[in-house]
């Protein structure tokens, strides 16, 4: 499909302009998707602010966004499971699917991973996107693309809960009540886990958690969350650390019960973090990690399509594509009022 499309071009740190790009060509194993909605992620905010995240340094112009959903416009000649008009969510990490790690099934760890919107890979804040068909997932009928784009953070939540190995009847604490923490909470509740503790220093986020049905919410500014949670629980079985902060990492170890498991979900600004190894040892506790997602999109879309998980309730703000600069700036300046922004293309 020749022609031009609208795109939000990042021209430098803090600067986005509406512009045009050619509509991408699609290969035999690819799908051309007309993007309808894209979620705004913390990584987008970091790139927008600084033009870089750690060793990832953007060159301009660049296109951000890696949480897209839309409608299939056209399919390559080898694509059998999708057709034009299908409503889809797009998984943003192109693994090689050939290396030993991919062949083991753990493709989120692929060393050849090409992730949408990192330096050199244009992201989804534009009208059309060509992407490998095996990473494009059809939604259940009736699913709105504004909900389907949240399959990405929900997949993060599903993967982390599955990594944790939590069993029915066990307890969980979630540190950080932002979009990912709220997704983790909803996945846990959907799996029948009822004893859930969530902490944050942000009232708006904690109110969201409460509205979604989380039983125990604690404001880290007001109380000693470790003491409060230990008082009620004698320590929890699984702790999901979703903040990426050193303080929360230390709290995680403090609130685990004997043989507890801390699941690192958040990413840390500084890679090296002091860990209380004696604290871990004295509980024979473990730290495990959960990176992005792997085979989780179908479950995410099923949970969204059936209404089992209400991703809509996580969204706090909606903007149009040509307001992207305003949306990202607002998110950075009013972090405490934002749980999730969804952009409409
Ligand atoms: Zn994201
Ligand atoms: Zn691979």
Image (cartoon, helix red, strand yellow):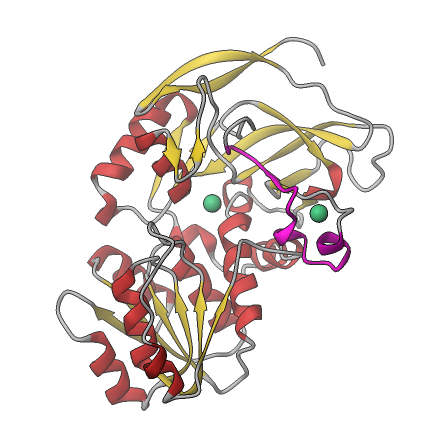
Q: Position of residue 337 (x, y in %)?
A: 23, 47
Pick the residue in front: 196 or 101.
Answer: 101
Q: Position of residue 49 (x, y in %)?
A: 30, 32
Q: Position of residue 97 (x, y in %)?
A: 75, 46
Q: Residue at x 75, y 49 (%)?
A: 99
Q: Is residue 80 left or right of residue 124?
A: right
Q: Is residue 42 left or right of residue 326?
A: right
Q: Residue at x 35, y 71 (%)?
A: 214
Q: Quadrant of residue 72?
A: top right
Q: Is residue 175 visible?
A: yes
Residue farthest left in this picture: 222
Up-down relation of residue 199 to residue 7 (above or below): below
Q: Quadrant of residue 33?
A: top right
**Which residues, given as a range, are shown in magenta?**
100-118
Q: How many marks?
A: 0
Q: Is residue 308 visible?
A: no
Residue farthest top in this picture: 3
Q: Is residue 109 magenta?
A: yes
Q: Is residue 9 magenta?
A: no
Q: Position of residue 60 (x, y in %)?
A: 44, 18
Q: Residue at x 54, y 53 (%)?
A: 292
Pick the residue in front: 50 or 235.
Answer: 50
Pick the residue in front: 144 or 20.
Answer: 20
Q: Residue at x 21, y 57 (%)?
A: 202
Location of the N terminus by quadrant is top right
């Amino acid at each position: 499909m020749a022609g031009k499309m609208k795109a939000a071009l990042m021209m430098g740190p803090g600067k986005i302009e509406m512009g045009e790009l050619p509509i991408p060509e699609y290969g035999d194993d690819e799908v051309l998707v007309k993007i309808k909605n894209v979620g705004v992620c913390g990584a987008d905010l970091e790139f927008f602010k600084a033009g870089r995240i750690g060793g990832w340094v953007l060159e301009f112009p660049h296109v951000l966004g890696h949480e897209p959903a839309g409608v299939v416009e056209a399919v390559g000649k080898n694509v059998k499971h999708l057709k034009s008009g299908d409503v889809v969510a797009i998984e943003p990490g192109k693994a090689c699917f050939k290396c030993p790690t991919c062949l083991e099934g753990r493709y989120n760890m692929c060393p050849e991973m090409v992730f949408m919107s990192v330096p050199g890979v244009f992201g989804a804040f534009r009208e059309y996107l060509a992407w490998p068909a095996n990473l494009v997932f059809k939604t259940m009928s009736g699913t709105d693309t504004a909900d389907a784009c949240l399959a990405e953070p929900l997949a993060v939540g599903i993967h982390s809960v599955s990594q944790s190995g939590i069993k029915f009847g066990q307890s969980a604490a979630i540190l950080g009540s932002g979009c990912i923490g709220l997704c983790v909470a909803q996945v846990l509740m959907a799996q029948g886990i009822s004893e859930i503790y969530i902490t944050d220093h942000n009232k708006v986020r904690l109110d969201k958690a409460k509205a979604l049905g989380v039983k125990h919410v604690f404001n880290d500014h007001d109380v000693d969350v470790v003491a409060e949670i230990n008082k009620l629980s004698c320590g929890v079985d699984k702790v999901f650390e979703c903040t990426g902060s050193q303080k929360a990492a230390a709290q995680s170890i403090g609130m685990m019960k004997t043989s507890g498991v801390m699941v690192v979900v958040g990413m840390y600004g500084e890679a090296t973090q002091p860990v209380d190894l004696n604290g871990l040892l004295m509980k024979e506790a473990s730290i495990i990690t959960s990176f992005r997602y792997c085979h989780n999109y179908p479950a995410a879309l099923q949970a969204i399509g059936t209404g089992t998980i209400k991703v809509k309730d996580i969204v706090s703000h909606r903007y149009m594509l040509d307001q992207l600069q305003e949306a990202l700036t607002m998110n950075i300046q009013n972090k405490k009022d934002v749980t999730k922004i969804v952009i409409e293309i």
